[in-house]
Image (cartoon, helix red, strand yellow):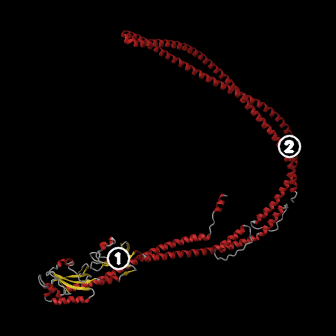
Amino acid sequence: MGKKNQKKTHSKKRIADEILLQVGRSVLIVFLVVAIVAIFMVQWIIVESKKSELKLQSESAANQLTGFFEEYAKASAQLAVNPEIQYVLTETKAGDNILETEKMDTVKQNLANVVKTDVENIMTTWIADIDANVLTQSDGYTSGDDWEVTERVWYQPCIETGSTILTEPYVDPASNKVILSAVTPVYDATVTQILGVAGVDVALDHLDIIMDNYKIGNDGFVFLISDAGMILYHPQSNMSQKNIADVDISQNVKDVVPTEEEIFMKYKANGTTKYGVAGPVGKTGYTVISNMPFLEYYSQLIGMLVILVVIFVVGILMIVLSIKRSAAKLTKPIMELNNTAQQLAAGDLDVNLDITSEDEIGELGESIGKTVTRLKEYIVYIDETAEVLDRIASGKLSIELKNDYVGEFQKIKDALINISDSMKNVMQGISDSAGQVSIGASELAEASQMLAEGAQTQATAVQRLASTTNTVTEQVLENRKDAELSVEATVHVTTMMEQNQDNMKMMMDAMNEIRETSQKVVGIIQTIEEIADQTNLLSLNASIEAARAGELGKGFAVVADEIGKLALESSKAANMTKELIGVSMEEINKGNEIAGNVMVSLEKSVSAVNDVNNIIKNTAEKAILQAENMEQIRTGIEEISQGVNDNSAVSEETYATSEQLANQTTVLNQMVKKFEL
């Protein structure tokens, strides 16, 4: 029963929910796996595309800047191999005026021609002679005596490398523009000795125009850094001409300048995370760095993630709806079959099935339909069985089954015939037994009547005996109470005598203490007598001394006489007290002797009272035992009386039951006669 109840308390599970749970979970897992793979792939594709974009922008800017700077480096190199310039620098010696050197006019024309090729960017061209320590420019400027070639920023790098260099940007004092110089050493005819240098000063205004064209995404850009770390270009004007070591940018950017290969970096600038690629600008030593803000770098990825999430959610919703529709379509015929099964379970065979599914459910519905058809055929058997059972219920035990029962219903037919035969035999047996029971009930009634009368007589006698026993018991109980009172009285007397004995002991102890105290007083009196004798002796000596003193000792003699009298009176009083104490001591001794005799008598009295008390206790205990025995006798008599009364009552009930049994036997015979055997 516990297991059945436990099963009933479980909530029912729907097939549609199970399908949705199982299929939905599998689909969800697949979707999650696909989504994760897609996210990683999209992330990889987008990140790689962003890296490629940054790399391409850096390479494009680097290439264009390389071409931009190489153009002026080539111009400087062409000037360095110009024969006229080589001739002028060879012929000009220390102390010579370079402007007076042969072929100088041709050199000036060559310098001017180079400027004309790119007027917008080339500020000026120039040559410098190392021996003569002089510089002359295409615009006609020639240095004075205070000019020192070795102090120029380009001198040391150019002489050491022996090749074309680009200087760090600087502000031209004349034009107030930011410029740089492309400087190339000029060798002699043997290409072993440097005669001087040829240079091209280039304004960087056009550089800003070139770099402004490089936009990466919405907010990305490219900036340029020189070999020494100076920012040559930055879209924020306040950043230009600053050294990268002085700006708020990550250390990895500062460490990568200059670089000889492309490097992808993640760094922070002004507290904002950025991604970029640092690459070299040809062989100039300059570095171009592209950058893109963090949000823009991942904007496409975020957008794709949002789209994937939306697609994922919409796909899940569509799959859930599809599963629900499919589950509903699948469970509808199952629910119809369930309703049919419930009707069959309730005994209603008048059901119809309309299931058109062509799958296993359709086959199940067809099988249940065949079962219902077969059950309808069994209704004939059920109707005839119900009719036969109604006949048996109405008392007609003879039955006849007209239909041929097939299958398991043959067992029902055999069972009904067996029931009919068995009921006939039972009713016949009940009828025969009822007659015998009726005779036995009459005889039992007569015997019960006689037993009841005898039990009544016994009950009366037992009640008299019980009354006598109660009287004796009451007397024994009274004796028991008197004995208990006697015991209590003797115990009380014993207690009082013991208390008096204790008091006598206390009195004797007190008298002994008085005697000891009196003896101490006698000792004190003796001391007083000795003091009185000494005082009397002193008084006598004082009188003698006073007599010797004459008139001067008269007063002292009077005092000595008074002291002597006082000593005599003290001695007399002490003697009288001693005599009285002696009389008291004699009386105390007599009292002690009398008290001792009284103590002996009290001890004998207590012993005698204890003996009497023990006798009374034994008597009381015997009285109690007698009372208990009488109580048991009385209880036994009451139980006998109760048993006799019960027997009498049972006899009367048996008599009444016998009469009822006889009456019921008559009714049973009448009921059995209703059945048609």
Q: Quadrant of the C terminus?
A: bottom right
Which residue is nearer to you in this view: 646 or 371? 646
Cα distance, mark 2 to mark 1? 127 Å
Q: Position of residue 530 (x, y in %)?
A: 44, 13
Instruction: Return the mark for residue 566.
Output: none
Identify residue type, mark 1: Val
Q: Badge 2, how many Cα within 10 Å: few under 14, some, many 20+? A: many
Mark 1 sits on what residue? 277
Q: Quadrant of the N terminus?
A: bottom right
Q: Residue at x 37, y 81 (%)?
A: 215
Occupied quadrant, residue 142: bottom left
Which residue is nearer to you in this view: 609 or 412? 609
Identify residue type, mark 2: Ser
Whether residue 476 is visible: yes
- Mark 1: secondary structure: strand
Occupied quadrant, residue 145: bottom left
Occupied quadrant, residue 203: bottom left
Q: Is residue 545 above or below residue 647?
A: above
Q: Is residue 19 above or below residue 661?
A: below
Mark 2 sits on what residue? 448
